[in-house]
Image (tube, rainbow, N blue to C red):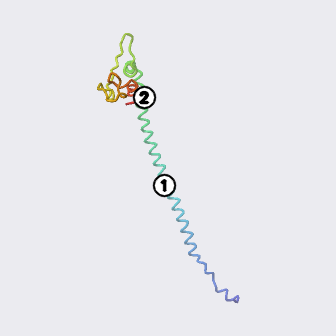
Amino acid sequence: MSPDRTKGYRLRFPVRRFLFAAVLAIVVYLLLSFGGLVMSGYKLNQQAEQLRREIALLKAENEALQKRLSALQTDEELERLAREDLNWVKPGEVLVLPIKQQEGLSSAPQSSNEASGKDGYPPNWRRWWALFWDR
């Protein structure tokens, strides 16, 4: 080829297509990045709302405990707590505890000798088991 023929040739590199693809890739990248930020913000807002609910519950529980504490600072409430919950008695009083009839401890004898004792009741170990573990 002669030098004057090469002057008229231009490179057939598609510059417009390359620029369009580059701009498109940048726009897609920016959209995906923005979408990721939006999702992160949404998750953070959800966590913040959950923490606000927990704080409200803890404040309500704290308020109830404060009321209970102030009530327990009175002599009447302390005596009620000691008598009802801790089964304390004053000197000269007698403590009477009712025994609840449990389903497994009926007076009817059971058919198996292992399941019932000589008197028709379950053996002591079953009564103790029922007392402590069957609730």
Q: Secondary structure at mark 1?
A: helix
In front of the other: 68 or 122: 122
The image position of residue 90, as x and y in percent, is 38, 13
The image position of residue 119, as x and y in percent, is 33, 21
Q: Amino acid at mark 1?
A: Met
Measure the C-alpha gap from mark 1 to mark 2.
40 Å
Which residue in the structure is indicated by mark 2?
A: 66
Q: Secondary structure at mark 2?
A: helix
Quadrant of res 118? top left
Which residue in the structure is indicated by mark 1?
A: 39
The image position of residue 5, as x and y in percent, is 67, 89
Is 10 placed above or below 83 here? below
Sequence-first tag of 1 and 2: 1
Q: Residues within 10 Å of mark 1 (few under 14, many from 20)?
A: few
Name the residue furthest right: 3
User: In the displayed structure, does residue 78 sit left or right of residue 17?
Assistant: left
Residue drawn at point x = 42 percent, y = 25 percent: 69
Q: Amino acid at mark 2?
A: Gln
Name the residue furthest top: 92
